[in-house]
Image (tube, rainbow, N blue to C red):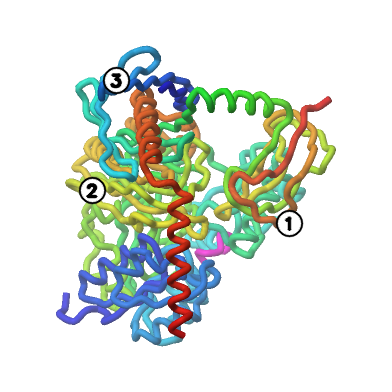
């Protein structure tokens, strides 16, 4: 690395743990960072950890993190030279990528044209088919209505997946197993597609039931060089929302990894890719099919970092600054095993419903080879405004067995109070013999009964609850009466107001 | 003091007796040796029991708490004897017909039934959008729609009444 940083100052157009993730690498590289924040995020960790923080005003994403003009104005006002979009929000918005470059700033992401092709599921399927990349059997044209869908479904064969052309993040996807389900599924998928992406176009493909979701991390520089960083196993998901990821996958051999990696690079080259990207595959019985390419840094990128020892954000910054990768595929070595668990604000026994509240207790795990990427702090108000992901726990071990034991240990240490989290679901997964043996697919998590707590300490829990209630009751009995306390504050406030009035 | 403690659907009777400053904990008639210490006022506690040590956290209000022990969360409903009698009456009343409430805050996207409709168990009644996901809210049993409490496009809070069902005649 040269003495002068790649950029003097970069702006991170995001929030939460990913904003902090980028800030951390930038700080290590001697760059200054600019955070942007909504009114809601005034106290957020990313707001506090950056060198400069610019208010976007407004609470809704559509008033803040999604407003390109506000972000570009913030970059201009603070003299930022580059913009990192994180994931979500504007990260896969081709117009924003263009606007950033038109403003004379470096865009820490792929070319707008690549975002456009890969962002449209129908376009990308066409492009990949043309480039010789294997895709899931299905049709590439948008379907008109549920009736037309039933006709086409007959040709492809059930089960069918209806997907939003503009989709991503599991939104706008519905699985249909028989013609009678088509109408309701079509309506829901189309409704979600319109509300989430403003684009109701749907397409259909064969739903490969017992598949695994395996993705390959790639990185290209602006000089035509590209490498892959192996795969990530993302089959532990529910309604297409990932819960636990691991690297490498138990089913991918060295030979298969090389083949999938080459196909992933082929996919990237077909759209003249630059920067970090992820090519998602559906894997079944030794065969793999292209699903989509995510033209951004993924949530689960840290497990690749743990296993390859490469800071992917650093590489993104180098590439955006115009540097060559400076190494080839032979330099990428995978060592050991890494697992990530997403800590989402969700109520697992209630069927993963969103959970809201204020974080009271907070005990984060630590110890050897445990990494926490988190936006949690005591006092954080978890609402419905943003993505429910609060933190990621990432562990590394010399092999999968050690990594599993380490993750269980870390989850035992974790406690997030005041809001329910997905951690118990991850714990249940880690204890399942089928997960331990590596024999699972994307249906595995949904097949588990998570409505009841596991762990077998119900008696102790019952005793603790009763003791807690007794102590609470004692505290309330000892505390001054609430009414008298309120009376006192009101009197106090009254006199204060009088005082201000007098002084005016 | 006697508490009825429901842990994930299984009921336990917990009796706490304090004599001469010594607290005895009995669960389902058996004495449990416990030493319960609160670490802070936020719900972190330490429990010694049966020669083992447990870092515990307890969150919630008087009647519903979540106890976390070693990464597992136990959902608990707790009642004393007086509350138990009151709740039993309410539960009995709720058996006939029923009120479907929003289990999460969201926006009603579409109503799929009208007043007077007969519905089957599992039939979708309305679509509720939360966290950008559309969720079908289903009838819990065969019933007739008695009242709709919401309209399409309406934002609802968690616990808000959505649909009242009555038993079919």
State the CA–CA distance, disc 2 to disc 1. Answer: 49 Å
Q: Which residue is mark 1?
A: A144
- Disc marking residue B19: 3
Q: Chain of mark 2?
A: A
In terms of secondary structure, where does tag 3 sit? strand
SS for dot 1: loop
Label 2 sits on residue: A370
Residue A399 vs A103, above or below: the answer is above
Q: Which residues are magenta?
A: A117-123
Q: Chain of mark 3?
A: B
Is the N terminus of chain A in the top left, top right, bottom left or bottom right quadrant? bottom left
Give the mark nearest the N terminus, 2 or 1.
1
**In the image, residue A405 lies at what x, y percent?**
25, 36
In front here: A204 or A65?
A: A65
Label 2: state its secondary structure. strand
Q: Residue at x 32, y 69 (%)?
A: A48
Q: Position of residue B157 (x, y in %)?
A: 61, 51
**Alpha-carbon span between mark 2 and mark 3:** 46 Å
Confirm whether the magenta stretch covers residue A120: yes
Where on the picture, by quarter, is residue B35? top left
Q: Main secondary structure of the magenta part?
A: helix
Q: Is residue A197 visible?
A: yes
Mark toward the viewer: 2 or 1: 2
């Amino acid at each position: 690395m040269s003495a002068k940083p790649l950029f003097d100052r970069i702006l991170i157009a995001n929030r939460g743990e990913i904003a902090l993730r980028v800030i951390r690498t930038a700080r290590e590289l001697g760059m200054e960072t600019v955070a942007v924040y909504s009114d809601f995020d005034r106290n957020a960790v990313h707001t506090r950890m950056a060198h400069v923080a610019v208010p976007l005003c407004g609470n809704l994403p559509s008033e803040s993190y999604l407003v390109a003009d506000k972000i570009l104005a913030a970059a201009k006002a603070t003299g930022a030279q580059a913009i990192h979009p994180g994931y979500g929000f504007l990260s896969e918005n081709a117009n924003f990528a263009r606007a950033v470059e038109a403003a004379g700033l470096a865009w820490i992401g792929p070319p707008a044209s690549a975002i456009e092709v890969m962002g449209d599921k129908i376009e990308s399927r066409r492009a990949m088919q043309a480039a010789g990349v294997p895709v899931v059997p299905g049709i590439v044209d948008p379907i008109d209505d549920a009736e037309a869908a039933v006709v086409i479904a007959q040709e492809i064969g059930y089960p069918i997946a209806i997907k939003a052309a503009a989709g991503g993040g599991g939104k706008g996807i519905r699985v249909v197993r028989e013609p009678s389900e088509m109408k309701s599924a079509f309506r829901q998928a189309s409704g979600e597609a319109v509300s989430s992406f403003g684009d109701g176009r749907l397409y259909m493909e064969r739903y490969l039931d017992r598949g695994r979701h395996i993705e390959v991390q790639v990185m290209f520089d602006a000089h035509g060089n590209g490498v892959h960083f192996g795969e990530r196993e993302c089959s532990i998901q529910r309604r297409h929302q990932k819960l636990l990821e691991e690297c490498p996958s138990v089913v991918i051999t060295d030979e298969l990894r090389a083949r999938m990696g080459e196909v992933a690079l082929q996919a990237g080259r077909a759209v003249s890719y630059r920067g970090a990207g992820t090519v998602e595959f559906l894997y079944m019985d030794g065969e793999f099919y292209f699903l989509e390419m995510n033209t951004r840094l993924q949530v689960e990128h840290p497990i690749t970092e743990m296993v390859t020892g490469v800071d992917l954000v650093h590489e993104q910054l180098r590439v955006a600054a115009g540097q060559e990768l400076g190494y080839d595929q032979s330099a990428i070595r995978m060592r050991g095993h890494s697992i990530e668990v997403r800590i989402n604000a969700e109520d697992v026994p209630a069927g993963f419903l969103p959970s809201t509240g204020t974080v009271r207790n907070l005990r984060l795990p630590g110890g050897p080879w445990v990494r926490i990427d988190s936006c949690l702090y005591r006092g954080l108000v978890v609402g419905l405004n943003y993505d429910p992901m609060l933190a990621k726990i990432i562990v590394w071990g010399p092999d999968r067995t050690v990594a599993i034991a380490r993750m269980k240990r870390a989850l035992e240490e974790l406690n997030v109070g005041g809001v329910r989290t997905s951690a118990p679901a991850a714990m249940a997964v880690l204890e399942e013999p089928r997960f331990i043996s590596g024999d699972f697919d994307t249906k595995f998590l949904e097949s588990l009964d998570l409505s009841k707590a596991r762990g077998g300490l119900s008696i102790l829990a019952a005793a603790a609850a009763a003791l807690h209630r007794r102590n609470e009751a004692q505290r309330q009995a000892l505390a001054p009466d609430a009414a008298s306390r309120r009376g006192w504050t009101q009197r106090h406030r009254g006199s204060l107001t009088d005082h201000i009035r007098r002084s005016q | 003091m006697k508490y009825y403690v429901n842990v994930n659907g299984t009921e336990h009777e917990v009796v706490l007796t304090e004599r001469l400053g010594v607290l005895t904990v009995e669960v389902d008639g058996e004495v449990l040796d416990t030493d319960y210490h609160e670490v802070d006022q936020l719900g972190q506690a330490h429990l010694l029991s049966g020669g083992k040590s447990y870092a515990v956290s307890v969150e919630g209000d008087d009647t519903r708490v979540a106890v976390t022990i070693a990464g597992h969360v136990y959902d608990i409903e707790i009642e004393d004897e007086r509350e138990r009698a009151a709740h039993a009456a309410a539960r009995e009343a709720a058996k006939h017909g029923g009120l479907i409430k929003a289990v999460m805050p969201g926006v009603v996207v579409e109503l799929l039934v009208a007043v007077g409709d007969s519905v089957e168990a599992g039939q979708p009644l309305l679509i509720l959008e939360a966290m950008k996901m559309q969720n079908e809210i289903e009838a819990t049993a065969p019933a007739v729609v008695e009242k709709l409490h919401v309209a399409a496009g309406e934002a609802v809070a968690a616990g808000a009444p959505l649909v009242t069902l009555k038993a079919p005649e």
